[in-house]
Amino acid sequence: MTLTINGEERTIGGEGMSAADLAAHLGLEGRIAMERNGMILKRDEWENETLEQGDTIEIVQFVGGG
């Protein structure tokens, strides 16, 4: 399946991939936020959010510092 992730078109996974599967596939852990087609996804809904061909995904990872 082809997705646009943070502005970059990528072929990744297959049919039935969830937002949680995508985060795991990309090795993302910790404090991240994900948006699908302009809508922010609640983290507790990632398992049930099935991605579709052509979706646009934006992922932001929060980092601390000072």
Image (cartoon, rainbow, N blue to C red):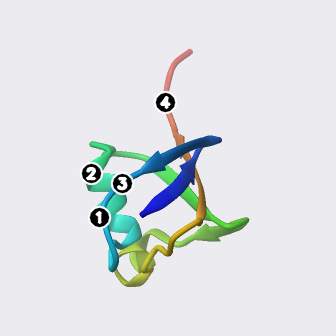
For the N terminus, the quadrant is bottom left
Q: Position of residue 42 (x, y in %)?
A: 52, 72
Determine crowd level at label 1: few under 14, some 14-19, many 20+ residues with C-alpha closer than 10 A. some
Determine crowd level at label 4: few under 14, some 14-19, many 20+ residues with C-alpha closer than 10 A. few
Instruction: Give the alpha-carbon distance from disc 4 to disc 2, as whole Å.
Output: 20 Å
Q: Which mark is residue 21?
A: 1
Nearer-N-terminus badge (3/2): 3
Quarter holding residue 34: bottom right
What residue is drawn where x is 27% and y is 51%? 25
Q: Is residue 37 above or below residue 22?
A: below
Residue marked by disc 3: 12
Q: Which mark is residue 25?
A: 2
Q: Which one is closest to the eye, mark 4 or mark 2?
A: 2
Residue marked by disc 4: 63
Q: Are the residues at dot 2 and dot 1 in contact (C-beta closer than 8 Å)?
A: yes
Looking at numbered disc 2 in the image, what kind of residue is underneath it? His
Instruction: Give the alpha-carbon distance from disc 4 to disc 1, as whole Å.
Output: 22 Å
Determine crowd level at label 2: few under 14, some 14-19, many 20+ residues with C-alpha closer than 10 A. few
What residue is drawn where x is 31% and y is 68%? 14
Looking at numbered disc 4 in the image, what kind of residue is underneath it? Val
Q: Which mark is residue 9?
A: none
* Residue 38 falls left or right of residue 5: right
Quarter holding residue 12: bottom left
- Residue reaching furthest bottom? 48
Instruction: Give the alpha-carbon distance from disc 4 to disc 3, as whole Å.
Output: 26 Å
Instruction: Give the alpha-carbon distance from disc 3 to disc 2, as whole Å.
Output: 9 Å
Q: Position of residue 24 (x, y in %)?
A: 26, 54
Q: Are the residues at dot 4 and dot 2 in contact (C-beta closer than 8 Å)?
A: no
